Image (tube, rainbow, N blue to C red):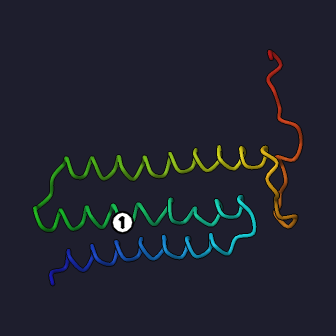
Amino acid sequence: MEGYEILAAVLILGGALLVLLSAVAMVRARDALQMMNVFSPATAMGLPLMVAGVFAHLTGRDGFDWWVLLVSLVTIASLVIVSSLASNTLARAVYQSGAPVDPQTHPQDLAGPARTSPDA
């Protein structure tokens, strides 16, 4: 086994471990907001680590390629940005839908009425 294969395996297995641990934590969560919160490590670190592992493997096997680097960077940036926006939007929707929230979940900033713009 060559060095790039070991690096790729460590990155991919590390990312997969984060996804697995987040999935187990989701099962143990008490409400929908906690489920979304415990899945953050998977989307913020687990999946990007797996993409970095694929990049390391392809670079070691085929040599450096600018296109592979660009695709990897765009993929990682997209995962981080889209997952952040989606989790924020979904958390707000869950909270405003009236779904039960564990009383120990703090802060409860969304408990008040939604703020509207003065033009509305």
Residue 94 image offset from top left, x and y in percent: 73, 49
Residue positioned 83% across, 35% down in the render: 114
For residue 113, which quarter of the picture? top right
Percent across and percent down for residue 118 are 83, 19
In the rendered image of this protein, does residue 56 appear above or below residue 100? below
Residue type (three-letter) at the residue carrying disc 1: Met
Looking at this view, name the residue that lies furthest to the bottom. Answer: 1
Q: Residue furthest top?
A: 119
- Dot 1, crowdedness within 10 Å: few (<14), some or many (≥20)? many
Measuring 64% from the left and 59% from the top, which residue is drawn there?
Answer: 36
Look at the image and tell me in which quarter the C terminus lies.
Answer: top right
Q: Quadrant of residue 117?
A: top right
In the shown orientation, is residue 101 left or right of residue 46?
A: right
Residue occupying the point 49% across, 74% down: 20
Q: Is residue 30 left or right of residue 7?
A: right
Whether 5 is drawn above or below 120: the answer is below
Q: On screen, 51 above or below 84?
A: below
Q: How many marks?
A: 1
Q: Residue at x 82, y 46 (%)?
A: 110
Q: Which residue is mark 1?
A: 50
> In the image, is 110 to the left or to the right of 7?
right
Residue 87 at x, y percent in the picture: 61, 50
Q: Which quarter of the image is occupied by the N terminus? A: bottom left
Label 1 residue SS? helix
- Residue 19 left/right relative to 119: left
